[in-house]
Image: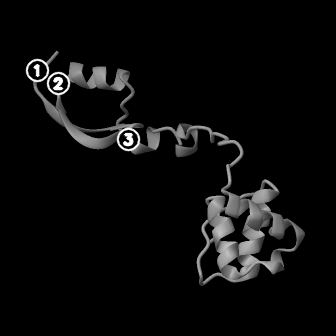
Amino acid sequence: MSDKKTPSWLFHPNKPAQIYHLTADEYEAMLKDGYVDSPAKLPAKEQAKEPEKDPGPKELSKEAEKLLAVFVVNPRDLSKDQLIDLAKAFDLRATKNMGEPTIAKAIQDYLDGNSQNAD
């Protein structure tokens, strides 16, 4: 085969795309190592994702446990700041510009197993 090096774009599912200067033999070796000559030939991103790991139950602080006890009885008994603190104890996003019902729904969804990080 020829020793002439030719510039070629090559793509790999786990590496950034780049131009390689390769001989024909080197080019074929790269293709065998999982590189492709077109981004359309890369596997779909959903296939490349790792399955989600269940982190298990979240350990709550004493304060969060108290807030949760009140929340379970009646979420409206908690102030906005308390709802935000409880949401953060579950790693949910909650901010001052959100309404109490939105924060309470995010917490309830989390408790019901339908967690969708509150926006």
Q: Is residue 94 above or below residue 57?
A: below
Q: How is the image coloured?
A: one colour
Mark 3 neighbour density, 10 Å: few (under 14) some (14–19) many (20 or more): few
* Residue type for callout 2: Thr
Mark 3 lies on a secondary structure that is loop
Q: Residue at x 13, y 19 (%)?
A: 2
The residues bearing labels 1 and 2 have C-alpha atoms spaced at a distance of 6 Å
Q: Earlier in the sequence, mark 2 or mark 3?
A: 2
Place of residue 23 in the rendered image (x, y in percent of width and height, measured from the top left): 17, 24
Residue highlighted by disc 2: 23
Mark 1 neighbour density, 10 Å: few (under 14) some (14–19) many (20 or more): few
- Given the current orientation, which residue lies at the most extreme front position? 62
Place of residue 35 in the rendered image (x, y in percent of width and height, measured from the top left): 36, 31
The residues bearing labels 3 and 1 have C-alpha atoms spaced at a distance of 24 Å
Give the label on residue 3, or none. 1
Place of residue 61 in the rendered image (x, y in percent of width and height, measured from the top left): 66, 56
Q: Earlier in the sequence, mark 3 or mark 1?
A: 1
On-image quarter of the C terminus: bottom right
Residue highlighted by disc 3: 38
- Depth check: give the residue in front, 80 or 112: 80
Q: Residue at x 71, y 74 (%)?
A: 103
Mark 1 lies on a secondary structure that is loop
Mark 2 lies on a secondary structure that is loop
- Depth check: give the residue in front, 104 or 29: 104
Q: Is residue 93 visible?
A: yes
* Residue type for callout 1: Asp
The residues bearing labels 2 and 3 have C-alpha atoms spaced at a distance of 18 Å
* Residue type for callout 3: Ser
Instruction: State the image quarter where residue 90 is shown.
Output: bottom right
- Depth check: give the residue in front, 114 or 27: 114
Place of residue 29 in the rendered image (x, y in percent of width and height, measured from the top left): 29, 20
